[in-house]
């Protein structure tokens, strides 16, 4: 991680988060193994971040990835990146019961804790799968000792999102004696509707200049830092044609719609990330927790379909 002097750094701050997982396992079939080249992609992406002035990031590490590549997790922790949890098996939370969610969490905590010597403070659900129907997950997270979550997208999406969730960091009351900080993914309000801009395929498809302009506007508009996310495989344009002896997906026919949705913009994403790092001060959630002003307090029950 670049340790450049930050004392005179007046760039707007942007939280950078990296979901460290395997594309095939997380997108095609959760029963697939994590491939060896996933470690190469992770090292390459973190190398790019490490070259940017004053940059750091939070890495939400999937437990399966940590089991397969503990050396990568040790390296990023030793380099000063915050290590957080992405769960263990990349099973979406709405498919789990509170009991099986807790089991998945504890398995993730165990493998990450064994590698870095401490429990992760933060969590991000696979596919942002904490929504109106399972906000009980925030209570489980708080009970298991997590300080923050970054799983909620304040949009009306086809697969995820809570459209009326606050579009800014807030303190969530989940129980009479428990609270957790929620860092929602960044959306931009256009004509009364929240549109996703904060990473992944959304950021790959936006022109770099437009992405930077929208994020800069969000930095000025809000009192807390916007959140940006990406995955190591987003800098790997050759993944779909790579033959792999480790997984069967390399030889299967992928639908054109999937290739477009998951593949467009990969070739230029590394440079897009470099440009973000030149225009913004890339920070971690740990940085944000230390710098956060007094946060708006909300109650999870107000947004729950089950309350």
Image: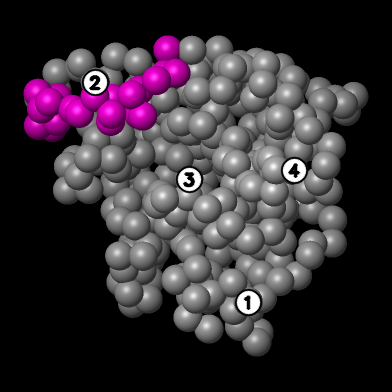
Q: What element carries label 4?
A: loop
Residue 251 lies in quadrant: top left
Question: Is residue 167 depicted above or below 51 in this figure?
Answer: below
Residue 273 lies in quadrant: top right
Report, in whole angstroms, how far the alpha carbon at label 1 lies from the one at label 3: 28 Å
Q: Is mark 3 on a helix, strand or loop?
A: strand
Label located before the other in sequence (3 or 4): 3
Which residue corresponds to the image point at 77% horizontal and 30% vertical from the top-left?
Answer: 216
Which residue corresponds to the image point at 47% horizontal and 62% vertical from the top-left?
Answer: 130
Identify the disc placed on residue 240.
Answer: 2
Residue 170 lies in quadrant: bottom right
Which residue corresponds to the image point at 37% horizontal and 35% vertical from the top-left?
Answer: 71
Report, in whole angstroms, how far the alpha carbon at label 4 lies from the one at label 2: 34 Å
**Magenta stretch, residue numbers:** 247-267
Q: Are marks 4 and 2 in contact (CB under 8 Å)?
A: no
Q: Is mark 2 on a helix, strand or loop?
A: helix
Q: Mark 4 points at which residue?
A: 225
């Amino acid at each position: 991680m670049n340790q450049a002097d930050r004392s005179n750094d007046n760039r707007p701050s942007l939280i950078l988060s990296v979901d460290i997982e395997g594309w095939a396992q997380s997108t095609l079939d959760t029963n697939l193994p994590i491939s060896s080249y996933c470690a190469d992609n992770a090292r390459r992406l973190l190398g790019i971040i490490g070259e940017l002035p004053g940059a750091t990031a939070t890495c939400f590490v999937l437990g399966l990835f940590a089991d397969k590549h503990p050396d990568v997790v040790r390296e990023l922790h030793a380099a000063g990146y915050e290590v957080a949890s992405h769960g263990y098996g990349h099973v979406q939370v709405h498919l789990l019961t509170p009991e099986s969610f807790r089991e998945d969490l504890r398995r993730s905590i165990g493998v990450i804790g064994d590698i870095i010597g401490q429990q992760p403070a933060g969590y991000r659900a696979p596919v942002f799968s904490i929504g109106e129907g399972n906000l009980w997950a925030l209570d489980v997270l708080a009970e298991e000792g997590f300080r923050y979550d970054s799983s909620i997208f304040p949009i009306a999406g086809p697969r995820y999102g809570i459209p009326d969730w606050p579009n800014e960091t807030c303190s969530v009351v989940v129980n009479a004696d428990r609270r957790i900080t929620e860092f929602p993914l960044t959306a931009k309000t256009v004509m009364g509707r929240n549109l996703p801009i904060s990473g992944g395929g959304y950021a790959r498809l936006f022109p770099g200049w437009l992405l930077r302009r929208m994020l800069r506007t969000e930095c000025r508009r809000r009192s807390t830092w916007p959140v940006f996310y990406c995955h190591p495989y987003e800098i790997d344009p050759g993944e779909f044609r790579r033959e792999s002896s480790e997984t069967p997906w390399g030889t299967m026919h992928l639908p054109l719609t999937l290739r477009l949705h998951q593949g467009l913009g990969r070739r230029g994403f590394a440079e897009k990330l470099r440009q973000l790092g030149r225009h913004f001060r890339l920070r971690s959630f740990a940085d944000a927790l230390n710098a956060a002003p007094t946060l708006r307090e909300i109650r999870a029950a107000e947004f729950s379909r089950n309350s």
